[in-house]
Amino acid sequence: MNRLPPFESSPAFASEEDRRDPLGIFRDRFHLPLGADGAPIIYFTGNSLGLQPVGAEAHVLEILEAWKTRGLDGHFSGPSPWLNYCEDLNSKVSVLVGADSTETVLMNALTINLHFLMASFYNPSAARYKVLVEQDAFPSDRYAIRSHVEWRGCDPENAILVLRPRGDETLLRTEDILTVIAESGSEIALVLLGGLNYYTGQLLDMEEITRAAHEAGCVVGFDLAHAAGNVALNLHDWNVDFAAWCTYKYLNAGPGGPGCIFVHARHSADSNLPALHGWWGQNIADRFRMLDNFAPARGALAFQISNPALLSTAPLKASLELFEEAGFPAILEKSRRLTGYFEYLLKTRIGEKATVITPGDPDHRGAQLSIRIHGGRDVFETLKSRGVSCDWREPGIIRMAPVPLYNSYSDVFQAVEALDDVT
Ligand SMILES: *Cc1c(COP(=O)(O)O)cnc(C)c1O
């Protein structure tokens, strides 16, 4: 099922693929940054900051206009009243992560949300107090977890259990994760892992990990910053307890775009779950009644604290419209083929000079390939100067992510050609 049709290493093949690409039309729906020569650069950093959808500006201006002309009334009137602005966006995001519409909510920013979610879902006791994390976790997650563990009065040296790859391997094996959970599960309060690792590009088997962790009595959360909008997710059916992600990577919300959380429906009726509340989490009928009593809104909505930052949410609306128009399954299908083509060209053109550390199995990765370059940092600098936008991670990894909504097969071909020239 995962077999890709044969590829060819020629510019003509890449152009023909672009011509036949049913999603090719979406490239023009984004602003592609231009290089010194006035031509679009090859943008392979959508894993860090997705490009601006052309429709974003109008959505931002609409809010500014409503504010300018209506003031406070913008909450209740105009083309998109602010009070309900996020409802439709929440439900469009929920589709992309395999959640019911009551299980996701846009709020705050990612790391902040990790803190709020840990306040609810990390409940250490004398016997069960550990947090299981992966060695290559994104630094912000590590700082958040460490500080949160200290905040709860635990010693991080003892309470943080780190998953490491075997020997000189770079990727985690599912069987090893399951073994740690089986052996130490009774001490683990929370399993909190990056669903798709930002550094290696490895996609974890979240369903299997969740099942094993629940069997051992642990709570399970995932950071999906690099997974949301990039790979197929089924958070509800996988029975994940909670998740958090940002919307400015594959979801193209722009710098500082809103965070999003998932809380499984089975927790929404759980009044024993501790939570830090604010007025925006009050049930909607009572939100503006300024009552003493807090009666939570339905589902994940109860976790909202403050009224949402709509100026930074508006661009997301444009992006989610494109996801809906293109259809997520079609986007995922193109992504597999595009990244498959990228990997094929790297193998046939670059060979020994670069090693892809991301899993070769398309079921265990998304758009991004992390490439160990033998030429060092100079290669990255030269690539950049040749109009290939990628990033460098010590000690020698270049991350490149062809994004199916706006990157083309010709982008991939030209990027590999540039890499071939400079290695
Ligand atoms: C991008 C990213 C972040 C960034 O956190 P913010 O709070 O949005 O600044 C955190 N964690 C992971 C895993 C990321 O990939």
Image (cartoon, rainbow, N blue to C red):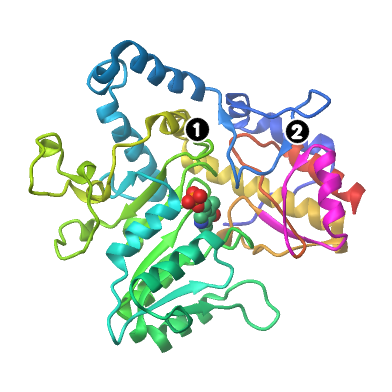
Residue 41, labelled with which disc? 2
Please report the residue visible at 53 percent of the width from the left and 77 percent of the height from the top.
163
Note whether 320 is above or below 259 in the view shown. above
In front of the other: 242 or 11: 242
Q: How many marks?
A: 2
**Callout 2: 10 Å neighbours few (<14), some, many (20+)?**
some
Please report the residue visible at 7 percent of the width from the left and 48 percent of the height from the top.
293
Which is more foreground, mark 1 or mark 2? Answer: 2
Residue 165, how many percent across, how many down? 61, 78
The span from disc 1 to disc 2 (Cα, nearest Å) is 23 Å
Is disc 1 placed on a helix, strand or loop? helix
**Callout 1: 10 Å neighbours few (<14), some, many (20+)?**
some
The residue beneath circle 1 is: 326
Note whether 25 is above or below 166 in the view shown. above
Q: Give the mark nearest the N terminus, 1 or 2.
A: 2
Residue 192, how many percent across, how many down? 42, 68
Residue 317, how many percent across, how many down? 42, 30
What's under tag 1, amino acid-wise?
A: Ala
What's under tag 2, amino acid-wise?
A: Ile
Magenta highlight range: 369-394
Please report the residue visible at 51 percent of the width from the left and 21 percent of the height from the top.
57
Task: Name the quarter where the C terminus is drawn.
Answer: bottom right
Note whether 227 is above or below 24 in the view shown. below
Q: Is residue 372 magenta?
A: yes
Task: Name the quarter where the N terminus is drawn.
Answer: bottom right
